Image (tube, rainbow, N blue to C red):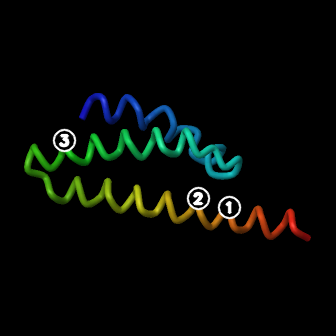
Amino acid sequence: MILGYALSLPILFRVLDVVHRQQRVRLTGHQIGMSLALLGWLFKGSVAAAALHLAWMIGLRLWFQIESRRARSVSAV
């Protein structure tokens, strides 16, 4: 879990920039870190914490995709 949080937390503090600037490498690093933290919580036996991490990962990915589509539609105009 320590490695996962070490990867994901610095990016989390700049999540607005990551989403708005469409920084895919940073998003991927954050998702990998969150996956490691999720696995840590599963091994520890906390399904609720793991589910929360999974929900965040899915929500962030959806937000990233929505912002990407919005940016493309604005630039096409």
Residue under the point 32% across and 35% down: 4
> In the rendered image, which residue does mark 2 sit on?
64
State the CA–CA distance, disc 2 to disc 3: 25 Å
State the CA–CA distance, disc 2 to disc 1: 6 Å
10 lies above or below 44: above
Q: Find out whether the residues at labels 2 and 1 contact each other: C-beta distance under 8 Å.
A: yes
In which quadrant is the N terminus drawn? top left
| Rendered location of residue 45, percent (x, y) | 8, 50
Q: Residues within 10 Å of mark 2 (few under 14, many from 20)?
A: many
> In the rendered image, which residue does mark 1 sit on?
68
In-image side of 74 versus 22 (left or right) = right
- Tag 2: amino acid: Phe
State the CA–CA distance, disc 1 to disc 3: 31 Å
27 lies above or below 6: below
- Tag 3: amino acid: Gly
First along the sequence among labels 1 and 3: 3
Residue under the point 28% across and 41% down: 36
* Label tally: 3
Question: Helix, strand or loop at disc 3?
Answer: helix
In which quadrant is the C terminus drawn? bottom right
Q: Quadrant of residue 67?
A: bottom right
> In the rendered image, which residue does mark 3 sit on?
40
| Rendered location of residue 49, percent (x, y) | 22, 53
Residue under the point 27% across and 42% down: 37
Q: Quadrant of residue 32?
A: top left
